Image: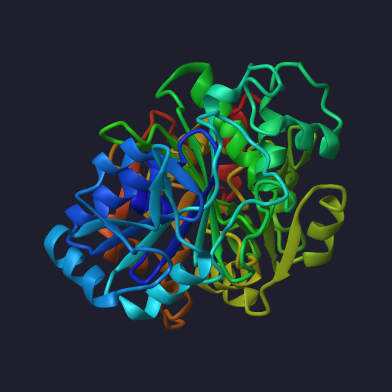
Amino acid sequence: MRLSEALGITRGDVVAFTGAGGKTSSLLTAGRELIDAGWRVIAATTTRIAVDELTSIPGAVTLGGDSLRPAAVSRALNQHGFIFLYRDVQNSKVIGLEPTTINELIDAVDSDVILVEADGARRLPFKAPYTHEPVIPSGTTLHVPVVGLNALGVPLDAEHVYNPEAIIAQYGYPGGERVRYPWIASVMRDPELGLKGVPPTARIVGMINRAPTTGIGRSAARLIARLILRERLISAVAFGSVQDADPILEVHRRVGAVVLAAGMSRRMNQPETSKVLLAWDGRPIIKAIVERLNRMRLDDIVIVTGHQAGQVRAVLERDSARFAHNADYQKGDMLSSLKTGLKALPPTISACLVALGDQPQIDPRIVSRILIAYYEGRGKIIAPSYKGRRGHPILIDRSLWGEILNLPKEGAPRDVINAHGEDTYYIETDNENILRDIDTPEDYREALRRAGLG
């Protein structure tokens, strides 16, 4: 995946890179990707960088102090497409621009994007800012805090970490001890450290650099990403190695689940009992499903209730889940329940895992594969498939929720899914339980038998 895609850079953005372990490389990689796409890219720094970094950029323009010369900048953009603006060179260091000058560039020059390195780290992989940094322009629209995964296991001291004293003072971590992955996440999401000075309206996407493609390192990157996302101001966390040809391995976003448990269970011939309350291995089916979902590190779980809503709430009162009631549950359609669930999810959720309330054999391994495929950018819809047949649960990106919410009453969620075949990625599995739900007493008996419970 491209870095610029992972960060969600759009035309008109002012992108500020802070932190350590790959800021300059991230800026250069994003710039090259965008110029290849035909964008006009300005890069700058509000601090100092090594003069040899300029050799990686097609054009370098000195402003000769702080005076902005829009016409000259525009001519350089016409010639090179990707330029670096700076104030001066002193002692082999490029002296950057004042934040106010960068703010002036936004309206004065016809660029598509401005990329800014907003602090320094002496080429170390992990940092906390000093009092005078970072220097982030107030016009910043996207903030990218960066850390190098190679910080894992290095001593928390000045030789290996930039300004370790601030980290020690903030959290009490023992100086000289090996850096652990929760420490990295804590610093990255801290409003006084990794998020210091971010303009209140800026989007925030974290970047973990130097993550390997396989093994323990990739697992560590995933854990750090999930911990960083505990800060609600951060919308996503990307990881990979920005100097690789394919720089981003995964982009972690918040995923919620909607469990459809509102149906009347008419085909069960037991109108007094909802099928989601039938016994499954010593507890109700709906509780078995929620317990499994709670082990999958989802960011929110919404149970859509309808028939026997009070009883469903009662059996889940100690579980980590929220409830949304479908007032139209008696009509028995999936669409109204899904609409109810989607409306109940907060705006911080980027995708929804749609699970059936009568599918107790939901497989955590399949859910894990669905989530990873989504983080890898495989599609906006991720669905399991058994012998060419689509099953559940299905993940749907927020960008498609509007189409579902706008479906007429006679519509069905599959109408939107079928209309986006090019955006759908299938997880092939040999587990036919993805196709099986419980509609009739025969289905229930067969499900118990297949699970070894009956």
Task: Examine the image and state in which quarter residue 77 appears.
Answer: bottom left
Task: Examine the image and state in which quarter residue 71 appears.
Answer: bottom left
Q: Residue at x 46, y 82 (%)?
A: 409
Q: Residue at x 16, y 58 (%)?
A: 80
Q: Residue at x 71, y 16 (%)?
A: 178
Which of the colour schemes (rainbow, by chain, secondary structure, one colour) is used?
Answer: rainbow
Position in image of residue 237 (x %, y %):
53, 46
Number of numbered markers: 0
Placement of 155 over or under 72, stated as above or below: above
Q: Quadrant of the C terminus?
A: top right
Of residues 224 and 244, the one nearer the viewer is 244
Position in image of residue 442 (x %, y %):
56, 43
Q: Residue at x 78, y 66 (%)?
A: 309
On the question of residue 379 being in view, the answer is: no
Task: Examine the image and state in which quarter residue 300 appears.
Answer: bottom right
On the question of residue 13 being in view, the answer is: yes
Position in image of residue 220 (x %, y %):
58, 26
Position in image of residue 84 (x %, y %):
31, 55
Relative side of 310 to 103, left or right: right
Placement of 330 over or under 441, stated as above or below: below
Relative side of 308 to 326, left or right: right
Q: Quadrant of the N terminus?
A: top left
Of residues 142 and 83, the one nearer the viewer is 83
